Image (cartoon, grey):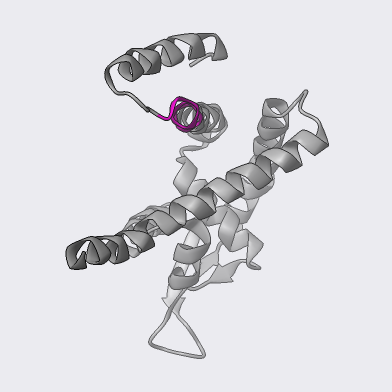
Amino acid sequence: MPASQLPLVAANLRGIARRVPGLPMTELMICRVAVILGRDLNAGLDRVLRPEGLAEPEYRVLAALYAQGGSACPRDLCAALAQSPANLTRICDTLVRRGLVSRSLDAKDRRRMQLTLRATGQRLLDKLIPAMSERVNEAFEGISAADKKRLLAGLTRLLECVDTLGSCEPAKRERERVA
């Protein structure tokens, strides 16, 4: 969605605000912009990945293996990629079938599985990482380094606040039940 459509998003929120007093307009607009931004950035990155037959989550798994020296256990990747074990297994099954990743028992602990980036996966990353980096750089063109740091700090703080929402709910309900 082009930025030119943001006024329509804001108009929709104003329409809701007329019916719901106290609606947090700025906060809701930030949420909408974040969702739209994520969707549109991923769509741009998918244009680089799609010709190679990769989806963005598959690329992230390959890149995470690359970042960890070419090999990692799935549990470590789940945490690094914010993926559920079931979803990571599905993604890795696809990468193994395509010959980009191999799966084997960990030599040090035979109860653990180890994923390893294969030479074909490495060659694909050698091609994709520069193209993906160029796409990301284009998206941030015209934004100063200082603004990028402030944006990152603000988004990180928002993520920390969102993380605490779930952990506060049971305690809040318990306090309300006792009161």
Q: Measured from the top left, where is residue 132 in percent x and y?
A: 64, 37
Compared with residue 148, is residue 23 higher up or lower down, i.e. above or below?
above
Q: What stretch is highlighted in magenta?
A: 24-32
The number of callouts visible is 0
Q: What residue is rendered at 46% in x and 38% in y? A: 53
How would you classify the magenta stretch by its main secondary structure? helix
Compared with residue 76, is residue 13 higher up or lower down, i.e. above or below?
above
66 and 168: which is toward the camera: 168
5 with respect to 17 (left or right): right
Q: Measured from the top left, where is residue 127 in percent x and y?
A: 67, 42
Q: What residue is rendered at 38% in x and 59% in y? A: 88
Q: Measured from the top left, where is residue 23 in percent x and y?
A: 37, 27
Q: Measured from the top left, where is residue 111 in percent x and y?
A: 38, 87
Q: What residue is rendered at 47% in x and 49% in y? A: 58
Residue farthest toward the left in the current orientation of the protein: 177
The verdict on residue 60 being magenta is no
